[in-house]
Structures are given as C-alpha cells and as structure tokens.
Image (spheres, helix red, strand yellow):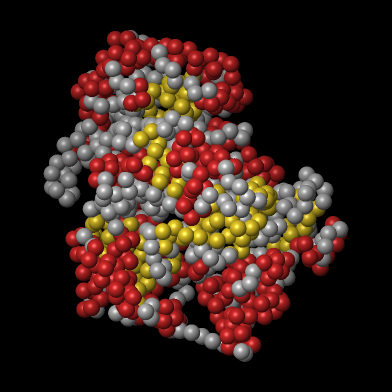
Amino acid sequence: MYVASESPLLKTGFFAIVKSHKTRANAKAWHCCYSTHAMTALRTPTPSSTRTQQQDPSNSLGLSMEDLKAELALRDAVQMLNTPRQLRMFFVHLLVNECVRKPRSTWEAFRDAFAQDFIQESDNVNVGVNQALEEIGRSLEEHGKSLGVYGLPESSFHSREVEVEIAHWKNRELLASRAGKAAAKLNAEQYEIYSEILQAVEEGQPLCAFVDGKAGRGKTFLVHSICNKLRSQGHIVLATATSGFAAQLYPGGRTTHSTFKVPVDEDKADLVSPIEPHDPRGELIREASVIIWDEAPMAKNAVLKCVDETCRRVMRNNLPFGGKVLVLLGDFRQTCPVIPYGNRRQIVGASIRSSALWQHFAVRRLTQPIRNAEDLPFADFVDSIGDGAGPLVPLDILQRVEERDHLIDFVYPPDALADPAKCLKRAILAPTNSQVDEYNNEILSRIGGATRTYRCFDMLKEDCAIDGVTPQAALAGVARTPPPGLPAHVLTLKTNGVYRLMCNYAPDRGLVKNTRVVVRAVGKRVVTVRILRGVGGVSVVDAEDILISRISFSTPLESGHMLIRRQFPLAPAYATTFNSCQGLTLDVVGVDLTRPVFSHGQLYTALSRIRHRSHARHTGHTIPVLGFGVAFGRAGRDPRSLTKPAVSEALKVGLRHFDTARMYNNEDHLGEVIRESGIPREELFITTKVDSAFHEYNKTTASVTDSLQRLGLDYVDLVLLHDPRAGRTLRLEAYKALLDLRAQGKIRSAGVSNYGVKHLEEIAAAGYEAPSVNQVELHPFCQQRPIVAYCKAHNIAIEAYCPLVRGKTDDPVIVKIANRADREEHLQLNKDPGQVLIRWSLQHGFIPLPLSSSPARIKSNADVFDFSLTESDIAELDALDQGPAGSVSWNPVDTE
C-alpha cells in the first residue's frame, strides 16, 4: 500500500497505512500511522517492521495511540448525544466503513451506552443488551453485513422478519383511509394497473408487470396507493428500488440489493443470493403478496436473474420469480445500467430488456402528465426532448436570465437561504462539476455559520508501478484531476449549510445517497447533521441529530491502481449536475446553459424535475444534436460556390448547427449566409477550429480573433483544436488559450478534434478541465472505441465527422437495414442508407456532422427523427467495425 496525503489531525504531515497481519473478524481494517515530517510519503513497512508497529504504531513517531483510535469518535458521540439509538446507528456506520479496529472490544467498552434506553425500559441489563444487539444486527443487514462478520455476540432474541413487517403497519384504519383517498385520485391509466395488481393478489395469480412511464407520470403515487391498500388488508408488500434515494420515497422502502441480499459484484454474470427458504428473510419474501421494484432499468440483467432465482428457491416454485406478483417501474429514457467505459452494445446487453426473463413481463404504460399537468405545453416540450424529436431544443418556452447572480437570486432568495427546509426542493443544475462547485461556493458564502475544513486521507492499495505509472504519479494525477463520485480532497463544512450524502450511510434511518441534510455542528472527528424531509407536501428539518464521521471510498484509477479516500461523505447540495438530479421533484430550478449542453438526455432529466415552466430559469442554450459540415474549401473545391447554397438549403430544412474551420477557407462565406438569413444569432450554433500550425498561446488567440472577424460574429459557440500534430507543449498552450478566450466571452465552449486517449489524458495531467467536445471520424467502419469510452467516462461530448463514410453507403448490411420492414407495424422503413448511418450516430449519443452540397441529400439527412434503429440493427452495424483500417479520412488520433 502507498499513501501520500495530508493528515487532518495534524497541521502538517503525511501518513502510511499498515495492513494488519493478525487474523480478526474485520480483516480489511487498516492501521493509520502518522509522520510529522511534512511532505514525506511513507511506503508500507516490511512485514518485520510491521509487527513492531502494530504493537504501538505511533511510538516510533512520537504520537499518542489515543489519537489514532476510532473509539475517540465514539467518546465524542457519547458526550454530544443523549440518545442510545443515535449511538447505535453511529456504531453501525463505523463498523461498515471499517473504522473500528477491534469491534468486539469496542462493543464491550460502550455496551451500556448503546443499550441504555432498552435497559431502562426493561429494567433488565441482559434484555436491554440483547435488544440493542438485535437492532444493530438489523441495521447491519441493510449493508449486507451481520453481527458475526464483526465478531459481535449474537442476540438471544430472534424476531421473525414477518412479524416485524406486519407490526410496522398495524394501524390499518389509517392505511385504509389513505388508500381510499388515493384511489379516488388515480387517473384511468393508473387505476387500470392498480386494479390488475390487486386482482392478481386477491386471486393468488402470478403476475410480472413493467410500468413504463416518463418522468412526472405518477409512478410514485401509484406505488403508494398499492402499498397502502394491500397493507391495510394485512398483506406484506416489499417496496424496493435500485437506488437508496428512490427507495426512501416509499414507506418501508429499501434497496433491491438489500432486500434480496444481491452480491455487489455485478460484473459477474451469475449472482447468487445467500437467502434460503428457512431464513427469516426467505420467510418474509415467501409471505410477501407483492414485490415492487422501482428504477428497474438502472439494474443489470444479472440482478434480475438473481432476484428470479432467489424467489424460485424460496417459493419452491419454478415459475418466473416463483409465481410472485412482481411489479417493475422505470423510464428507459432516463436510466440504464452503468458500465464503466462501456459502449452502447455493452450497455444494451446488460439491460434487463436483454434478459431472457423480459419476455414474461407485461408492459403497462403511463402517458398522462401528473407532475406538470398544470402546464401541458411544457410537458409536451419536455417529452419532445426525451424522445429526441428533432435536431433543435428551442428554449423560448422558458424564461432566461443573463447573470449567474440573477440565477442564484431566483432559486435561493435570502429567505430561502435563512431556512434550510426551504432549500429541499430547490436546485441549480449545471452540466459540469466545475460549474456546480462555483455555484455551491458562492451560495455557501452567503450563509452565516461556523466553518471547519477537513482534509482527506488518500491511499493506494498497491505500492508498485502499474504499466509504468508509479504510485507517486498516480496520486499526483488524483490531485490534479479528482476522480468523479468522491468527496472533495479539501472539504469545508458550514453550520446551517445544506449538503447531500455521497453514499448509503444508514438506509434504515433514511440516510441514503443524495439525501439532503443540514449541518448542525462541525467537530474535530464528528459532524452533526439533521435530515431534510418532505412531509405532507411541506419541507421540514428532522428533529433527530445524526453523527457523521469519515468513511472510506474506493475507486479504480486509469493507471490501474485502486484509490482509497477517507473523508466525510458530504457535498454541498445547492447546485448539482444534470446526471445527479434524477429522482428529485423540485419546486424551483435554475438551469445553467452558459456552456452548451451536448446531450439532450441530460436536459430532459433536468427539466423533467419541475411541474411548471414558471418554476425554471435558464442562462444559455443547447447544442443541436445534428450538425452540418461545411468543409467545402478543401480538396480543390470552390468554397464560395458550394458553401453559400449548401448552408442556405440546410437552414431551410431547420438545421442550425454549422461546423467550419480556419483551414476550410470559408468562414467568411458562412458568416455572410447566416447574416443574410435573418435568423437570430442565439438560434444558431457555430463551430470553428484552430489547426496545428497555430497551436501556441498567442497564435491560437490571434487565430480565434481572426475567425471572429471573418465570421462577423461577437462570439463563437465552440472552438476546437483541429488536430494534435503540434506536439504536447504547443497543444497545451493552445488549449489554455481557448480556456482564457472562453473566460473573456469570445467563445462559449472549448474542445478538441482528432484527439486520442493519450492527448486527452495529457490535458487532465496538466490540471485543465476536460474539453467539452472531441470531434473524431466516427461511423460503423471506424468506431474509435477506446476514444469513445474515455470521452463518455469523462463527460466529453463526441462529434462524428465523416458519418456517411464519404458515400460508402452500398454496404449490404446498411442497405438491408434501410429496406427492412417494421417489426411491429409491418411497414417498410423506407429510409436511405445515409439516414441509417446518421441514426446510428444519434443512437450512440454522438453528434453527427454530415456534409453535402445536394439539396435533396441535405433534406434527407435532416429527416432522421421519425424512426429508430432496433437493438439488432445497432448490433449488426457495430459488427462492421474495422478499427483504424476502416478510416476514410486523415484520422491523426495516434499522433505523438
């Protein structure tokens, strides 16, 4: 193991981690040894020296061992809290995050404090201690753990999970009242699904249903109605969701993984749950009348298979899912399985729709808007984005503000910042983490409160070089370019500030990933928070204090090393990325589009959070998903005779995204035709490029200035470095120039073209933010898979030039797909091969830039939003990949 990170317990200093060689229940725990020698990275000691340090790893460094024990945090907790319940939850948190070196000893030391309420209630120490153990055990089960894993004594009480579940819903009159009121509010679509499920339960018939509904169609309300009705009749309903955040939307909800004890290693094709028929959990599943699974499209088909096999085993019934009533819900437009660096084919292959079990599901659709029913034109507008109905997203339907401060004032006026509860259903959404950080820092500066800064512990599991990358270099890269999904290296917390949890901290207490909390106190080792909840349509601050301590996050680095970061699992929650806002229903939203959004799926997720257009403001525009290449000034072509008529035709058919370059020699011609068109500048998206001959800071700045003059524009929407041939030093200078030009308002976004993975990595290694776009040659014969995987993993939009393979449209596979009959309607597709190629790009999430001077072809290339390729079509086209050999252009992605 290799470590190089500043200790939060010392003003200066780095530390090493020593893995214990003793056998104990928590075999993954690590000892922390601190060095007061600043800026010195210590390697893991040899086994012989390790044994000495394990007896007292701080003696040789002159530190007190007491400063290194997790028990200090518990002692702080005992002094700060009054309720044993909070202490038990905190102990579970320390256990599951491997913060306790000797769990049994810690339990013995704090046993009476953990069990104080139960002891007083029962007036019996043994009874109280066993009740405390039972509760701790149930909480550990939410994390897939048990008392035995940590060497803790088993409780002598073994409450049946069935009894606990039934007792939880004992107020049947209240549930029946809620169910009756809810049933009266169901629309026709909801009521049909509701009745079908109740009938299946009443008749004891198996049912597998998938409820397909876009955002805001009332899926959550439907589930609440079903749960209340069945529970009021004494039935057991297992309400689950793929994410912990969604699970908390339902009373008694928990994650599907937790409910069925699905192993977390989803990369395996076969996952086996340890649940057996005689287990308490097995009995609970057997007695359940209905299983509900929200966000099912997010899960991999291996998880669906595991749930199926578990149900069959528990029910001793070989029907699908053991003959249970299983209801899946979700929206495939928003969610899909997460496959690191995966391409579309891999993602589709992992989807539950690719499972052999999918054939057993009856699809039921919710189409009527509920969330934004008061503004149906806005609902239609959001749907059109989600459906990819056209190349443009006109934002005229939303109000626009010109300044960032105005956006903050709209979403978070002073009265909202003074009351954390009012912040629960407000958010500013932006496409990049850097923009989110800027907003959060500004908003936190407007709030009064005590602050404390916490530095993380960073370590690598490996202390050797991997593929030539040393541990020092790997950690240096982490410092320059923080991996996504981890808490900040330096985290400043402020009392009265609103933050979100970055992990499933305590699911049984409602503390799951993305839960909003308000910070109440900032201690040396412990932070006190309270949950923000929505109760009956009103946002409130929970009355219970909860303690948070540092936990371990792990993530693989591109070097092949495994990074482990210990930090408080908190991040400011006033602003968030489009990708992180799913599952929220918001009353007030600000959408930052000062840097164009390059994915309409992201915009769909963002705008579908709100009920009415008046609840939103935006600060910019989006990039059209279909562009038009104007490289007519190359290969001896006359740019004037081709550019103006071609662009005029493109404008006539609704295209607004034009891609030119300095080397095309037609920037002035493009500028003329767009001025003559009379189309407002804000409706157009113009890209130009700086070729490698001008890749030096001053030359790049001058080149962009010249392009603006030739185009006759005050700004360009996107400027790309045309190729990487200038060499590392000059291309980095050029990229820095683009970032500075963006700050000056001369360009909206900075990107690159023809960049391979190594060129993109050098930008990250230099400490610069990732490019907005990488434009490369892309079509079925040259799919640039490593580049595409890197870009998707780092939120870099991908533009495809030569999407029509320069006329290579007579391939038998492409022709066959263009001529195929529609599988459902039995109609001919009646599309030409060029349209098939453009759809292939669009459905892979690329932004294609077809080029043509033929009016008929220009019109045809734009007419691609009334059909979709099937998954089998995509698979056949993907199989045409020839790698670099399939290139039809210069494709300098391997340039040094």
Residue 171 rendering spot, x and y as whole percentages: 37, 79
Height in image: 403 above or below 553?
above
**Which part of the image, by quadrant, shows the C terminus?**
top right
Residue 577 rendering spot, x and y as whole percentages: 47, 44
Task: Answer left or right for 150 relative to 795.
Answer: right
**Residue furthest front in the image:** 415
- Name the residue rendered at 16%, 37% in the picture: 830
- Name the residue rendered at 24%, 35% in the picture: 864
Residue 249, visible in the rendered structure? yes
Height in image: 122 above or below 378?
below
Q: Nearer the viewer, residue 455 or 700?
A: 455
**Which part of the image, by quadrant, shows the N terminus?**
bottom right
Task: Answer left or right for 21 relative to 424.
Answer: right
Residue 771 rendering spot, x and y as whole percentages: 50, 32
Q: Nearer the viewer, residue 794 or 2?
A: 794
Task: Answer left or right for 851 relative to 473.
Answer: left
- Name the residue rendered at 68%, 46% in the picture: 471
Residue 12 rendering spot, x and y as whole percentages: 78, 48
> In which quadrant of the rendered view does residue 246 lie?
bottom left
Residue 577, visible in the rendered structure? no
Height in image: 285 above or below 696?
below
- Name the residue rendered at 22%, 66% in the picture: 184
Height in image: 212 above or below 293?
above
Number of numbered tags placed on the structure image: 0
